[in-house]
Image (spheres, grey):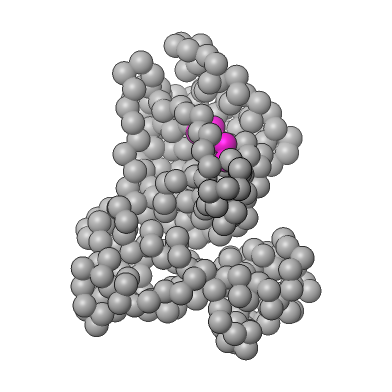
Amino acid sequence: MRPNRLNVPQNDARSFDLRHEFVPYFTNPWHFHPEFELNHVISGSGTRFIGNCIERFESGEVILIGKNLPHYWKNDSIYYQSDSGMMSEAMVVRFSEDFAGKDFFQLPETGAISALLNKAAAGIKLMEPLRSEIAGHLQTLIRMTGFEQLMFLISMLHKIAVSTHLQPLSTPYAPSQLLAKNSNRLSQVMAYLHEHFTGQIFLNEVADLANMNESAFCRYFKSQTGQTLIQYVTDLRIRYACELLVKSEESVTQICFQVGFENVSHFIHAFKKLRGQTPFEFKKGKQPGYLPSLTPKEM
């Protein structure tokens, strides 16, 4: 499992990274990078992780991600089956905060874009009708070149910046903490947990990832996150359960096992402890929302 800092390819012919991905499933694990990212899932479905937010993703969504904000699109299990015939497709634009020139977004005319990029620290989901408009613009953008392409991207960012059809995704996140020290070790652990939290998590396997014995790892993980490994994994599972309870028609029992709990009574107890109500009450009320931050505490 590699560290979750992604090195975005640099292109001498373009000031930003633009790619069209057509793959059986999205392959980048839980990762971050100093570039902003505009991500359009053309086709595919699964679970999306952005900062502290865990949601289902479906074809058509457009998301703007701030710099160093961890994120991960994990396809549904059917996409990993070799004979499924399923494919995932996305348009991805990654750009640095000075890709258009140093202090360009400090100009009076670009103030709205500067404010948008600040808001992107929590991740932003584009809603209709803006979503469809920007999705179409991305299809146009990839066919352009040179100066025309650069100006079109800046125009797109301005269109997003002045729109009211935006939904923040994550509670405040402090990704810089992951960059400060021990980032390689912690990043590998976090990537593994986000990849496998709906299955069985074994302490010895996670400790091995950090190249530590179990007792030393437990102390290290608690010092970095403010939570025990069990608490962190339980938080991930409950967050995902909230998303499924709000947006799916599956029963509480089905969701219990889907998010990684081994019995319903434990699921109900853990859910009520964190949410202040049972999953049955939550599902009946269909109350979306987020739990306290999973952000590593100040180092």
Q: Which of 56 and 129 is in front in this view?
A: 56
Residue 165 found in image quarter: top right
* Residue 28 painted magenta: no
Residue at point 21% right, 68% down? 211
Percent x, y for residue 143? 55, 16
* Residue 90 painted magenta: yes
Q: In this view of the protein, can residue 142 be seen by the observer? A: yes
Residue at point 38% right, 22% down? 15
- What is the count of numbered marks? 0
Percent x, y for residue 237? 54, 71
> Where, quadrant-wise, is the N terminus in this rendering?
bottom left
Percent x, y for residue 46? 59, 53
Above or below 260: residue 178: above
Magenta-colored span:
88-92
Q: Is residue 177 left or right of residue 42?
A: left
Q: In this view of the protein, can residue 172 be seen by the observer? A: no
Residue at point 47% right, 17% down? 150
Q: Is residue 78 left or right of residue 190?
A: right
Above or below 105: residue 28: below
Percent x, y for residue 145? 48, 12
Residue 159 found in image quarter: top right
> Where, quadrant-wise, is the C terminus in this rendering?
bottom left
Above or below 240: residue 174: above
